[in-house]
Amino acid sequence: MNDTGRSWRRSGAARVLLGAIVSGAATMATAGDCKFSRLAEIPITMNGTRPLIDTRIDGREASFLIDSGAFYSVISRATADQYALHLRPAPTGMYMIGLGGRVELQIATVKDFSLAGIPVRNVEFLVGGSEVGSGAAGLIGQNLLSHFDVEYDLAHGALRLFRAESCSKRMLAYWVAPGQSYSTMSIEWPTPRQPHTVGVGYLNGTRIDITFDTGAAVSLLSRHAAARAGLRPDSPGVVDAGYMHGLGNAMEKTYVGTFDSFKVGDDEEIQHARLRFIDSDLPVGDMLLGADFFLSHRIMVANSQHRLYVTYNGGPVFDLRTRPASAPPVTTSSETPAVAPAQTAAAAAPPAAAPAATSDGAGGERAAGDTLDAAGFARRGVAESARNDLAAAIADLTRACELDAAVAEYRYQRGVAYWKSRDPARAKADFDRALELRADYLPALIARAQLALGRGDRQAAARDLAAAEAAAPRQADQRLALAELDLRADRAAAAVADLDDWIPEHRVDSRRGGALLWRCVARAQAGSALDGAIDDCGGIIKHSPAGSPAQRAALQSRGLVRLRQGRYADALEDYDHALKNDTDPSAWALYGRGVAELRTGKPDAGRADISAAQKRWPEVAARFQEMGLVPEGLAPADPDTQAADPQAH
């Protein structure tokens, strides 16, 4: 999901990789003079709406995000450090522009890299920007993808690379059955300076340039595209959709609104489409069609024809959910496309009918599912889970577990599907089994800790978090999530340690502000490095918009630090600013202000705030007592109370 300020050459190692893929071509499928070869099928595992592939860096396992919106393959600085890669400066003038801003770059060379089982030496990656997330070491971009015709079949867990010869007049969506509807559109020719997959769509009848971007977890409009179609952040019916981040170091505000019509390709139109738009412009084009769209469609990017073919899989098209990164997604619904007038394989001309599909199961349709192996069932099940087709996901993942009971990941993924189905008991049983198979399996440790916190068992959560921290590399991106969970589990000192590891390795990251805020909170709760906590929160207060959620959170966190320092008047000032015009104040902030008021001679106001806080979250008094911040004469709530304040941290 990014662009570049300067084109970049294809490295010798990239040419070797391309040659190795071409040499492994499957048997030609032919129709007349057209020869359409499948060169490689790369298994895809979805992490939510992030398509990941398995690779190896110098013999060590690494997941990479397939990012059709990236001009080149990229890793973060923290990943380069984690894999002990040597860095050198990028050419003068080389930079990336992604969601969140401009990113300066370095270059790393992986001596031994493998993709799709093909080993290649001396592969170059650009280094810079925020972490990709989802446990990925980096992303694979158009420096590889643009040299092929690429089929994105994320719903069946596959990316397929093709080579077409003399097929300019053929319809290359080979999986389309007679009578099945499909849509097609022209796309721009890929070039070294502009390798992205870009086509034209229409929003409320207004032309927009669309970038097909698997690296974008959700589809996204630019501010100007939404405005040209008649919607702005203050338009009736537009709702706040939270913040997003990309490779840049800034968070971007987003909104969701309803548009009368969204049309992509020649024959797919969604009426009354609810779409997410950003409060800024995009690096490339007017809209990113993200992985949510790719999950709900099967897409052939025919670079050889500069055309794109789309068929609809069914189910929600766009993911409009807003949720904390640490919580499992919840089931939701969205629009389904109305395809009219219907174009069918029988009626399409030009291009002519597609060449025959290869005979080795490349189609991946569910009807042929009984031929899948355990890994195939698992990939399809994870994709179904990402689309919230949870019954199908559980069935496929159960089949994967039956075919290979020794793979911890299959149990973990089925546990996630059960969790999303609101069945925490079965989810925990699968996480337990996954950890019996592999005691240091980090995703299962984190997930089981979250489940434990959800039922109020902080001791069980603490055991899993300690094990996860022992298993995670020091530079691992997961340490940020671990720190957040540590705070919920009353492990403030552990949260400080995680953040002390994470923050220096992520100096250019859109989540750095949140990490500094959490470290301020963790230091306040732990009663350590309080002057450092003041610095952490002070920077956020200074640079955040007045009254913004970030500034409010930083003010109430600094208020807690000042309580611990005995600076009660200063603490009261911070809490007053944090709670000003707050229509939904947290128990944490109300109780803190109550303590400050009591200790500055305002007993009536203090007791009122403390009473209001305890009504919102009975456990808050016991938590403050643990820090020595409950004034004499005020009885804390029962320390065994397990109710959780969702705004406690």
Image (cartoon, grey):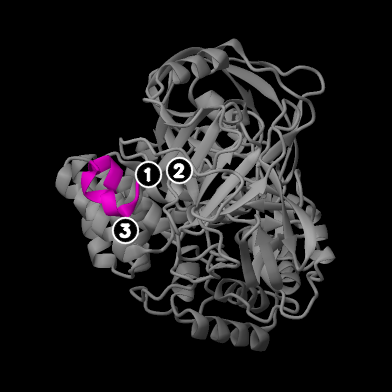
Task: Name which quarter of the figure residue 73 lies in.
Answer: top right
> Which residue is labeled 2 in the image?
174
Tell me, for residue 393, which label it has, or none. 3
Q: Secondary structure at mark 1?
A: loop
Residue at 19% x, 48% y: name it. 401
- Does the rendering let one see residue 153? yes
* Residue 39, image x, y percentages: 44, 26
Vertical position of residue 625 compared to residue 102: above or below: below
Secondary structure predominantly adopted by residues drawn in magenta: helix
Mark 1 to mark 2 CA distance (whole Å): 8 Å
User: Closer to the camera, 211 or 647?
Assistant: 211
| Residue corresponding to mark 1 | 363
**Residue depth check, mark 1 versus mark 2: number of the one nearer the observer:** 2
Tell me the quadrant of the picture where the N terminus can be found: top right
Q: Nearer the viewer, mark 3 or mark 2?
A: 2
Q: Amino acid at mark 2?
A: Tyr
Part of the protein shown in magenta: 364-377
Counting residues from the start of the chain, the first of labels 1 and 3 encountered is 1
Looking at the rendered structure, the kind of residue marked 3 is Ala
Q: Residues within 10 Å of mark 3 (few under 14, many from 20)?
A: many
Q: Which mark is residue 188?
A: none
Question: Could you tell which of marks 3 and 2 lies nearer the N-terminus?
Answer: 2
Which of labels 1 and 3 is toward the front? Answer: 1
Estimate the spatial distance between the alpha carbons at disc 1 and disc 3, rounded to whole Å: 19 Å
Relative to residue 404, is residue 458 depicted above or below?
below
Q: What residue is at 55 percent from the left and 24 percent from the top? A: 80
Comes first in the chain, label 1 or label 2: 2
x%, y% of residue 521?
Answer: 58, 56
User: Which one is nearer the viewer's eye here, 312 or 376?
Assistant: 312
Q: Residue at left 72%, top 19%?
A: 90
